[in-house]
Image (cartoon, rainbow, N blue to C red):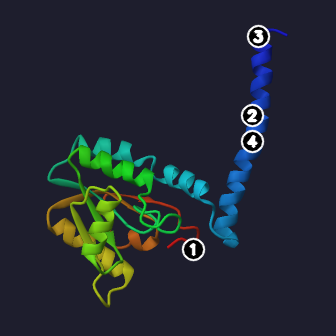
Amino acid sequence: MSLGTFRTAALATLTAVALPVTLLTTAASAEAASGGGLPGYRMWQADVREAVGPAIPWLRDRSARHGGKPAVVLDIDNTALETHYHPGRANQPVLEVAEWAHEHHMSVLFVTARTSSSSARKQMKDAGYPVDAVCTREHGESKDEGKARCREELTEDGYTITANIGNRPTDFEGGYYEKGFKLPDYGGRLS
């Protein structure tokens, strides 16, 4: 057998072996999305990496032509923090985006449905995030109303929200951002 024939045969074998793993991964995501429960941590992290993978290239392009005060807005629970899987721990793919933004002179802002900004700020700093501002929901506001109000107020304060990262539809309702990056919430089961 020639080296070229051997490589072709080996590649075909590797592809055949890798295909079931890909199908299992897809089946796990489909099961989680259809009501089979939440995926395991590793699957969630793979899904998060896929969702935020385009964020740094977007920010790199956007920062090259920015004006004013460019900013990234992050939701907290199950976005910036691994609240369901490891309470209080930073969600590494999202932390990487926040660190990149901070290193490139973009503000890192948090918009949350929580109602205490001081505890949210402390928790984000403890998890290793740079924190330029935290905006919380006011008592009596729905989650979507509070988050939209926060983004509007931050925009009125002069920030240009270039990227908005969250895991729930309420993180994106009401606008006031250029591009959204939605992490999985598996049909609302991961709040």
Give the image location of residue 138, x and y in percent: 27, 84
According to the picture, the residue beneath numbered tag 4 turns out to be 19
Q: Is residue 150 above or below residue 181?
A: below
Are circles 2 and 4 on residues that touch, CB within 8 Å?
Answer: yes
The residue at the point 48 percent across, 60 percent down is: 183
According to the picture, the residue beneath numbered tag 1 turns out to be 189
CA gap between label 3 and label 2 equals: 18 Å
Is disc 4 placed on a helix, strand or loop? helix
Please name the amino acid that badge 3 sits on: Leu
Is disc 1 placed on a helix, strand or loop? loop
Q: Quadrant of residue 149?
A: bottom left
The residue at the point 29 percent across, 61 percent down is: 125
Number of residues whose C-alpha sits closer than 10 Å to that of mark 1, classed few (under 14), some (14–19) or many (20 or more):
few
CA gap between label 2 and label 4 equals: 6 Å
According to the picture, the residue beneath numbered tag 3 turns out to be 3
Number of residues whose C-alpha sits closer than 10 Å to that of mark 3, classed few (under 14), some (14–19) or many (20 or more):
few
Q: Earlier in the sequence, mark 4 or mark 1?
A: 4
Q: Quadrant of residue 20?
A: top right
CA gap between label 2 and label 1 equals: 33 Å
Q: Earlier in the sequence, mark 3 or mark 2?
A: 3
CA gap between label 1 and label 3 equals: 51 Å
Give the image location of residue 136, x and y in percent: 28, 76
Q: Which mark is residue 15?
A: 2
Give the image location of residue 79, x and y in percent: 43, 63
